[in-house]
Image (cartoon, helix red, strand yellow):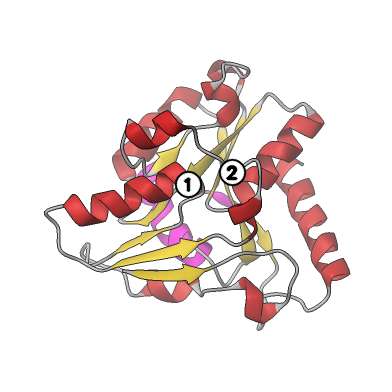
Amino acid sequence: MLLLPHGYEGQGPDHSSARIERFLTLCAQDNMTVAQPSTPASYFHLLRWQVHSPLTRPMIVFTPKSLLRAKVSTSLTRDFTEGYFRAVLDDRGITEQRIDPAAIQRVLLCSGKVGYDLMAERDKRERNDVAVLRMERLYPLPRQTLTDLLGRFGDAEIVWVQDEPANMGPWPFMSQHLPDVLGGPIRSVTRIQSSSPSVGSLHRHEEEQRDLLDRAFA
């Protein structure tokens, strides 16, 4: 098992990227597990699954940075003592019955910290027509789970959202494989292609983040 810190908090290129795209490039024929858990319980059940699973294969885990101290990223005691690892986490608003799945017109697929950013922005804009689904496992692609969850939203638009530039992060892999799962093309919202994992200016990072959220909800 390989644990690699990964997070976009505006602290510069060395801080930001564990190069998700490079590991996903190596994935084929179920040769490894690549995951990016976003809650303590999800991380716990992921490690537990790796120990007890009859499968013997490497696991690459992209671990959070700012989420380690974020109050929004918490789990209840019963989340550890009950349940199991879920490859895709449902929208918090839907599970709390604040959002009606039938009213959803756009589904934002993502992984990691940006999921919390999207949910906070959705609540701020009072956009109850948008759902946010977090993929906790990037490979093997959770095809059946995605099909079952997305099937509730009918003809809603599916959009992939990530912190990383378009040529990095999960998008190069997802752009190739998600259309087969969804049965059609999928639009992406990312930072522009870049030769660097991130900018070196916090102010520039915040501008890019604001633009990213604006485009996700445009």
Where residue 73 is drawn, which disc sits there? 2
> SS for tag 2?
loop
The amino acid type found where label 2 is placed reads Ser
Residue at (37, 48) in percent of width and height? 44
Residue at (11, 54) in percent of width and height? 54
Residue 172 colored magenta?
A: yes
The amino acid type found where label 1 is placed reads Pro
Q: Residue 36: image x %, image y %?
A: 46, 56
Where residue 32 is drawn, which disc sits there? none
> SS for tag 1?
helix
Task: Using the image as rendered, state which of residue 69 and residue 196 is in the foreground.
Answer: 69
Instruction: Please give the residue where the numbered disc 1 appears in the rendered image.
Output: 40
Residue at (78, 79) in percent of width and height? 200
Q: Quadrant of residue 13?
A: bottom right
Label 2 – label 1 distance at C-alpha:
7 Å
Q: Residue 213: image x %, image y %?
A: 75, 48
- Classify the position of the N terminus by image quarter: bottom left
- Tell me, yes or no, whether the two marked residues, 2 and 1, touch with CB atoms within 8 Å: yes
Task: Using the image as rendered, state which of residue 125 and residue 155 is in the foreground.
Answer: 125
Magenta-colored segment: predominant secondary structure: helix
User: Which is more N-terminal, label 1 or label 2?
Assistant: 1
Q: Is residue 94 above or below residue 132?
A: above
Q: How many marks?
A: 2
- Classify the position of the C terminus by image quarter: top right
| Left or right position of 81 against 56 | right
Give the crowd class for mark 2: few <14, some 14-19, many >=20 residues within 10 Å. Answer: some
- Tell me which segment is drawn in magenta: 171-188
